[in-house]
Amino acid sequence: CRAQNVSILLGPAMNIKRSPLCGRNFEYISEDPYLSGKIAAAHIRGVQKWNVGTSVKHFACNNQEFFRMSVSSEMDERTLREIYLSGFEIAVKESKPKTMMCSYNQINGVYSAENKKLLTDILRGEWSFDGYVMTDWGAVADRAKGIAAGLDLEMPASGGVNDAKIVEAVKAGTLDEKLLDKAVENMLNVLFDYVDNPHDDAVFDNERDHKKAVKVESECAVLLENNGILPLKKDAKILYVGEYAKVPRYQGGGSSHIQCSRVSNAFDVALEKNRSVDYAKAFPADRDLADDGEIKAAVEKAKCADVVVVFAGLPDVIECEGFDRKNMDL
Protein backbone atom coordinates (compact mmCIF):
# COMPACT_ATOMS: atom_id res chain seq x y z
CA CYS A 1 0.00 0.00 0.00
CA ARG A 2 2.78 2.45 0.88
CA ALA A 3 4.64 1.71 -2.35
CA GLN A 4 1.45 2.29 -4.35
CA ASN A 5 0.58 5.43 -2.35
CA VAL A 6 -2.57 3.82 -0.91
CA SER A 7 -3.37 5.21 2.53
CA ILE A 8 -6.44 3.14 3.46
CA LEU A 9 -6.78 -0.62 2.87
CA LEU A 10 -10.42 -1.64 2.45
CA GLY A 11 -10.53 -4.47 4.97
CA PRO A 12 -10.69 -6.64 6.93
CA ALA A 13 -14.18 -7.88 6.07
CA MET A 14 -15.53 -9.46 9.23
CA ASN A 15 -19.25 -9.98 8.87
CA ILE A 16 -20.39 -13.16 10.57
CA LYS A 17 -20.98 -16.21 8.37
CA ARG A 18 -24.54 -16.83 9.52
CA SER A 19 -25.46 -18.82 6.40
CA PRO A 20 -23.19 -21.04 4.28
CA LEU A 21 -25.01 -19.68 1.22
CA CYS A 22 -23.83 -16.08 1.61
CA GLY A 23 -22.13 -15.14 -1.64
CA ARG A 24 -19.39 -13.21 0.11
CA ASN A 25 -18.40 -15.75 2.78
CA PHE A 26 -15.02 -16.24 1.10
CA GLU A 27 -14.11 -12.72 2.25
CA TYR A 28 -15.31 -13.05 5.83
CA ILE A 29 -13.19 -14.42 8.65
CA SER A 30 -15.42 -16.78 10.62
CA GLU A 31 -18.84 -17.77 11.90
CA ASP A 32 -17.51 -17.15 15.41
CA PRO A 33 -17.53 -13.53 16.70
CA TYR A 34 -14.62 -13.97 19.10
CA LEU A 35 -12.37 -15.55 16.47
CA SER A 36 -13.35 -12.90 13.91
CA GLY A 37 -12.56 -10.12 16.34
CA LYS A 38 -9.17 -11.49 17.38
CA ILE A 39 -7.98 -12.23 13.84
CA ALA A 40 -9.25 -8.86 12.58
CA ALA A 41 -7.51 -7.03 15.43
CA ALA A 42 -4.20 -8.72 14.64
CA HIS A 43 -4.61 -7.95 10.94
CA ILE A 44 -5.36 -4.29 11.66
CA ARG A 45 -2.35 -3.89 13.94
CA GLY A 46 -0.10 -5.50 11.33
CA VAL A 47 -1.28 -3.17 8.57
CA GLN A 48 -1.43 0.03 10.59
CA LYS A 49 2.10 -0.30 11.99
CA TRP A 50 3.16 0.63 8.43
CA ASN A 51 1.11 3.81 8.66
CA VAL A 52 -1.58 2.44 6.37
CA GLY A 53 -5.10 2.72 7.70
CA THR A 54 -7.70 -0.05 7.60
CA SER A 55 -11.41 0.09 6.93
CA VAL A 56 -13.20 -2.55 8.99
CA LYS A 57 -16.31 -3.70 7.15
CA HIS A 58 -19.24 -4.04 6.74
CA PHE A 59 -20.64 -2.47 9.89
CA ALA A 60 -23.00 -4.18 10.61
CA CYS A 61 -25.33 -7.18 10.18
CA ASN A 62 -24.55 -7.52 6.46
CA ASN A 63 -24.71 -11.31 6.23
CA GLN A 64 -26.35 -11.92 2.88
CA GLU A 65 -26.01 -10.51 -0.62
CA PHE A 66 -29.67 -11.05 -1.57
CA PHE A 67 -31.30 -7.57 -1.62
CA ARG A 68 -28.34 -6.26 0.39
CA MET A 69 -29.06 -2.65 -0.62
CA SER A 70 -32.48 -2.62 1.00
CA VAL A 71 -32.98 -5.63 3.27
CA SER A 72 -33.56 -5.06 6.98
CA SER A 73 -31.77 -7.37 9.40
CA GLU A 74 -34.27 -7.85 12.20
CA MET A 75 -33.01 -8.91 15.63
CA ASP A 76 -33.26 -8.31 19.35
CA GLU A 77 -30.60 -6.54 21.38
CA ARG A 78 -28.93 -9.70 22.68
CA THR A 79 -28.53 -11.15 19.18
CA LEU A 80 -27.14 -7.85 17.91
CA ARG A 81 -24.62 -7.57 20.72
CA GLU A 82 -23.48 -11.18 21.12
CA ILE A 83 -23.30 -12.26 17.48
CA TYR A 84 -23.17 -9.33 15.09
CA LEU A 85 -21.32 -6.60 17.02
CA SER A 86 -19.02 -8.62 19.25
CA GLY A 87 -16.28 -9.14 16.65
CA PHE A 88 -16.32 -5.49 15.62
CA GLU A 89 -16.10 -4.45 19.27
CA ILE A 90 -13.00 -6.59 19.83
CA ALA A 91 -11.34 -5.22 16.69
CA VAL A 92 -12.06 -1.58 17.57
CA LYS A 93 -10.99 -1.79 21.20
CA GLU A 94 -7.84 -3.87 20.61
CA SER A 95 -6.48 -2.31 17.43
CA LYS A 96 -8.01 1.17 16.94
CA PRO A 97 -8.69 1.02 13.17
CA LYS A 98 -8.48 4.33 11.32
CA THR A 99 -11.84 3.88 9.58
CA MET A 100 -15.02 1.84 9.70
CA MET A 101 -17.14 1.08 6.64
CA CYS A 102 -20.88 0.98 7.24
CA SER A 103 -22.98 -1.59 5.42
CA TYR A 104 -25.76 -1.29 2.84
CA ASN A 105 -28.56 -2.91 4.81
CA GLN A 106 -30.99 -1.67 7.39
CA ILE A 107 -30.91 -2.83 10.99
CA ASN A 108 -34.38 -3.09 12.47
CA GLY A 109 -35.65 -0.71 9.81
CA VAL A 110 -32.85 1.90 9.93
CA TYR A 111 -30.10 2.04 7.31
CA SER A 112 -26.61 1.54 8.72
CA ALA A 113 -25.54 4.83 7.13
CA GLU A 114 -28.24 6.67 9.12
CA ASN A 115 -28.08 4.62 12.29
CA LYS A 116 -27.13 6.89 15.21
CA LYS A 117 -27.31 4.03 17.70
CA LEU A 118 -24.77 2.10 15.64
CA LEU A 119 -22.41 4.84 14.42
CA THR A 120 -22.42 7.23 17.37
CA ASP A 121 -23.91 5.72 20.53
CA ILE A 122 -22.17 2.33 20.28
CA LEU A 123 -19.14 2.87 18.02
CA ARG A 124 -17.95 6.20 19.41
CA GLY A 125 -19.74 6.38 22.75
CA GLU A 126 -19.29 2.83 24.07
CA TRP A 127 -16.20 1.69 22.13
CA SER A 128 -14.32 5.04 21.96
CA PHE A 129 -13.69 4.81 18.20
CA ASP A 130 -11.82 7.94 17.08
CA GLY A 131 -11.35 7.44 13.33
CA TYR A 132 -13.85 8.22 10.60
CA VAL A 133 -16.85 6.29 9.29
CA MET A 134 -17.23 5.80 5.54
CA THR A 135 -19.92 4.13 3.49
CA ASP A 136 -19.79 1.04 1.42
CA TRP A 137 -19.90 2.10 -2.24
CA GLY A 138 -23.30 3.68 -2.87
CA ALA A 139 -24.71 3.01 0.62
CA VAL A 140 -25.99 6.56 1.21
CA ALA A 141 -29.76 6.97 1.34
CA ASP A 142 -29.98 10.46 2.90
CA ARG A 143 -26.61 12.23 3.20
CA ALA A 144 -27.71 14.83 5.77
CA LYS A 145 -29.33 12.20 8.00
CA GLY A 146 -26.12 10.20 7.72
CA ILE A 147 -23.96 13.04 9.03
CA ALA A 148 -26.37 13.59 11.92
CA ALA A 149 -26.09 9.88 12.74
CA GLY A 150 -22.28 9.80 12.67
CA LEU A 151 -21.41 9.09 9.02
CA ASP A 152 -18.36 11.08 7.90
CA LEU A 153 -17.40 10.11 4.35
CA GLU A 154 -19.53 9.09 1.37
CA MET A 155 -17.94 6.70 -1.11
CA PRO A 156 -17.71 7.20 -3.97
CA ALA A 157 -18.27 10.92 -4.55
CA SER A 158 -21.74 11.95 -5.74
CA GLY A 159 -20.47 14.57 -8.19
CA GLY A 160 -21.60 17.36 -5.92
CA VAL A 161 -25.23 16.24 -5.66
CA ASN A 162 -25.11 15.22 -2.00
CA ASP A 163 -22.72 18.07 -1.15
CA ALA A 164 -25.44 20.48 -2.22
CA LYS A 165 -27.97 18.64 -0.06
CA ILE A 166 -25.66 19.03 2.95
CA VAL A 167 -25.46 22.79 2.36
CA GLU A 168 -29.25 22.99 1.98
CA ALA A 169 -29.79 21.04 5.21
CA VAL A 170 -27.44 23.33 7.17
CA LYS A 171 -29.10 26.47 5.76
CA ALA A 172 -32.56 25.08 6.53
CA GLY A 173 -31.56 24.26 10.09
CA THR A 174 -32.27 20.53 9.72
CA LEU A 175 -28.56 19.67 10.11
CA ASP A 176 -26.49 21.20 12.89
CA GLU A 177 -23.35 22.72 11.35
CA LYS A 178 -21.36 21.50 14.37
CA LEU A 179 -22.08 17.91 13.30
CA LEU A 180 -20.77 18.68 9.81
CA ASP A 181 -17.64 20.24 11.34
CA LYS A 182 -17.12 17.12 13.43
CA ALA A 183 -17.33 14.89 10.34
CA VAL A 184 -14.69 17.03 8.61
CA GLU A 185 -12.50 16.96 11.72
CA ASN A 186 -12.74 13.17 11.96
CA MET A 187 -11.42 12.80 8.41
CA LEU A 188 -8.69 15.41 8.75
CA ASN A 189 -7.32 13.78 11.89
CA VAL A 190 -6.73 10.57 9.91
CA LEU A 191 -5.46 12.32 6.78
CA PHE A 192 -2.89 14.39 8.66
CA ASP A 193 -1.44 11.18 10.11
CA TYR A 194 -0.36 10.12 6.62
CA VAL A 195 1.01 13.50 5.63
CA ASP A 196 3.25 13.50 8.70
CA ASN A 197 4.42 9.88 8.50
CA PRO A 198 5.41 8.88 4.96
CA HIS A 199 7.22 5.63 4.06
CA ASP A 200 9.26 6.81 1.09
CA ASP A 201 11.46 3.71 1.14
CA ALA A 202 8.57 1.26 0.70
CA VAL A 203 8.90 -1.18 -2.21
CA PHE A 204 6.49 -3.58 -3.91
CA ASP A 205 8.58 -6.73 -4.41
CA ASN A 206 6.51 -9.14 -6.51
CA GLU A 207 8.98 -12.03 -6.27
CA ARG A 208 9.32 -11.78 -2.50
CA ASP A 209 5.55 -11.49 -2.07
CA HIS A 210 4.96 -14.51 -4.31
CA LYS A 211 7.26 -16.66 -2.18
CA LYS A 212 5.50 -15.47 0.95
CA ALA A 213 2.11 -16.28 -0.58
CA VAL A 214 3.30 -19.81 -1.41
CA LYS A 215 4.45 -20.28 2.20
CA VAL A 216 1.14 -19.03 3.60
CA GLU A 217 -0.90 -21.18 1.22
CA SER A 218 1.14 -24.27 2.11
CA GLU A 219 0.46 -23.70 5.80
CA CYS A 220 -3.26 -23.30 5.10
CA ALA A 221 -3.73 -26.62 3.29
CA VAL A 222 -6.15 -28.94 5.12
CA LEU A 223 -6.02 -32.74 4.83
CA LEU A 224 -9.42 -34.17 5.77
CA GLU A 225 -8.47 -37.85 5.63
CA ASN A 226 -5.63 -40.01 4.37
CA ASN A 227 -6.39 -43.65 3.59
CA GLY A 228 -2.79 -44.50 2.75
CA ILE A 229 -2.86 -42.65 -0.58
CA LEU A 230 -0.53 -39.82 0.44
CA PRO A 231 2.22 -39.08 -0.13
CA LEU A 232 1.97 -40.10 -3.78
CA LYS A 233 4.78 -42.34 -5.01
CA LYS A 234 7.30 -40.41 -7.09
CA ASP A 235 7.18 -42.95 -9.91
CA ALA A 236 3.37 -43.10 -10.02
CA LYS A 237 1.51 -42.26 -13.24
CA ILE A 238 -0.75 -39.42 -12.15
CA LEU A 239 -3.71 -37.82 -13.90
CA TYR A 240 -4.78 -34.30 -12.98
CA VAL A 241 -8.47 -33.76 -13.73
CA GLY A 242 -10.16 -30.36 -13.91
CA GLU A 243 -9.10 -27.00 -15.35
CA TYR A 244 -8.31 -25.71 -11.85
CA ALA A 245 -5.11 -27.78 -12.13
CA LYS A 246 -3.96 -25.18 -14.67
CA VAL A 247 -6.13 -22.18 -13.75
CA PRO A 248 -6.40 -22.24 -9.95
CA ARG A 249 -9.26 -20.52 -8.20
CA TYR A 250 -7.74 -18.78 -5.20
CA GLN A 251 -10.26 -16.01 -4.55
CA GLY A 252 -13.92 -15.13 -4.90
CA GLY A 253 -15.48 -12.75 -7.40
CA GLY A 254 -16.51 -9.14 -6.91
CA SER A 255 -14.89 -5.96 -5.61
CA SER A 256 -12.23 -7.83 -3.63
CA HIS A 257 -10.81 -9.49 -6.75
CA ILE A 258 -7.05 -8.96 -7.06
CA GLN A 259 -5.05 -9.01 -10.29
CA CYS A 260 -1.97 -10.95 -9.30
CA SER A 261 1.44 -10.40 -10.88
CA ARG A 262 2.08 -14.13 -10.98
CA VAL A 263 0.03 -17.27 -10.37
CA SER A 264 1.50 -20.76 -10.06
CA ASN A 265 -0.50 -23.85 -10.97
CA ALA A 266 -0.25 -27.46 -9.85
CA PHE A 267 0.27 -28.95 -13.32
CA ASP A 268 3.28 -26.76 -14.22
CA VAL A 269 4.84 -27.29 -10.80
CA ALA A 270 4.51 -31.09 -11.20
CA LEU A 271 6.23 -30.93 -14.59
CA GLU A 272 9.02 -28.78 -13.13
CA LYS A 273 9.59 -31.52 -10.55
CA ASN A 274 9.73 -34.18 -13.32
CA ARG A 275 6.66 -36.02 -12.08
CA SER A 276 4.80 -38.30 -14.49
CA VAL A 277 1.63 -36.23 -14.78
CA ASP A 278 -1.03 -36.18 -17.49
CA TYR A 279 -3.94 -33.74 -17.70
CA ALA A 280 -7.61 -33.85 -18.61
CA LYS A 281 -9.73 -30.70 -18.56
CA ALA A 282 -13.06 -32.49 -17.85
CA PHE A 283 -14.77 -29.27 -16.77
CA PRO A 284 -13.98 -25.56 -17.20
CA ALA A 285 -12.74 -23.19 -14.49
CA ASP A 286 -15.04 -20.27 -15.30
CA ARG A 287 -18.49 -21.81 -15.87
CA ASP A 288 -20.95 -24.18 -14.22
CA LEU A 289 -20.90 -26.50 -17.18
CA ALA A 290 -20.24 -30.17 -17.95
CA ASP A 291 -19.00 -31.27 -21.39
CA ASP A 292 -19.74 -34.94 -22.07
CA GLY A 293 -16.85 -35.20 -24.53
CA GLU A 294 -14.35 -33.74 -22.07
CA ILE A 295 -15.59 -36.01 -19.29
CA LYS A 296 -15.39 -39.10 -21.52
CA ALA A 297 -11.80 -38.19 -22.45
CA ALA A 298 -10.91 -37.85 -18.75
CA VAL A 299 -12.40 -41.26 -17.99
CA GLU A 300 -10.32 -42.86 -20.75
CA LYS A 301 -7.11 -41.25 -19.49
CA ALA A 302 -7.93 -42.34 -15.93
CA LYS A 303 -7.87 -45.98 -17.03
CA CYS A 304 -4.14 -45.63 -17.70
CA ALA A 305 -3.27 -43.79 -14.48
CA ASP A 306 -2.18 -45.13 -11.10
CA VAL A 307 -3.68 -42.17 -9.28
CA VAL A 308 -6.26 -39.53 -10.23
CA VAL A 309 -6.16 -36.10 -8.56
CA VAL A 310 -9.35 -34.12 -9.04
CA PHE A 311 -9.15 -30.32 -8.85
CA ALA A 312 -12.69 -29.29 -7.99
CA GLY A 313 -14.10 -25.91 -7.05
CA LEU A 314 -16.71 -23.27 -7.73
CA PRO A 315 -16.52 -20.63 -10.49
CA ASP A 316 -17.24 -16.94 -9.95
CA VAL A 317 -20.76 -17.38 -11.33
CA ILE A 318 -21.60 -19.37 -8.18
CA GLU A 319 -19.48 -17.75 -5.48
CA CYS A 320 -19.32 -13.98 -5.86
CA GLU A 321 -20.24 -10.67 -4.29
CA GLY A 322 -23.70 -9.40 -5.28
CA PHE A 323 -25.68 -12.63 -4.99
CA ASP A 324 -26.01 -15.63 -2.71
CA ARG A 325 -25.54 -19.27 -3.60
CA LYS A 326 -28.72 -21.21 -4.41
CA ASN A 327 -27.48 -24.41 -2.77
CA MET A 328 -24.44 -26.11 -1.25
CA ASP A 329 -23.76 -28.36 -4.27
CA LEU A 330 -20.21 -28.78 -5.55
Image (cartoon, rainbow, N blue to C red):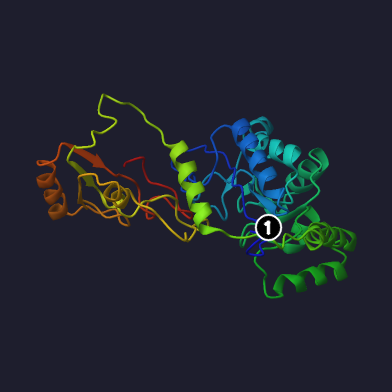
Relative depth, front residue between 218 and 311: 218
As drawn, the residue found furthest toward the right would be: 178
Residue lying at 63% horizontally and 31% vertically, measured from the top left: 34
Residue lying at 47% horizontally and 36% vertically, measured from the top left: 219
Q: Where is residue 272 in the image (x, y as percent from the top left)?
A: 30, 50
* Lateral position of residue 273 relative to residue 73, left or right: left
Question: Which residue type carries mark 1?
Answer: Ile
* Lateral position of residue 135 relative to residue 209, left or right: right
Dot 1 lies on which element?
A: strand
Task: Work out whether 6 lies above or below 94.
Answer: below
Q: Mark 1 points at which residue?
A: 8
Q: Quadrant of the C terminus?
A: top left
Q: Position of residue 33 (x, y in %)?
A: 61, 33
Residue 50 seen from this side = yes
Q: Position of residue 282 (x, y in %)?
A: 20, 51
Residue 67 seen from this side = no
* Lateral position of residue 93 relative to residue 156, left or right: right
Relative depth, front residue between 293 and 107: 293
Q: Quadrant of the N terminus?
A: bottom right
Q: Position of residue 286 (x, y in %)?
A: 32, 57
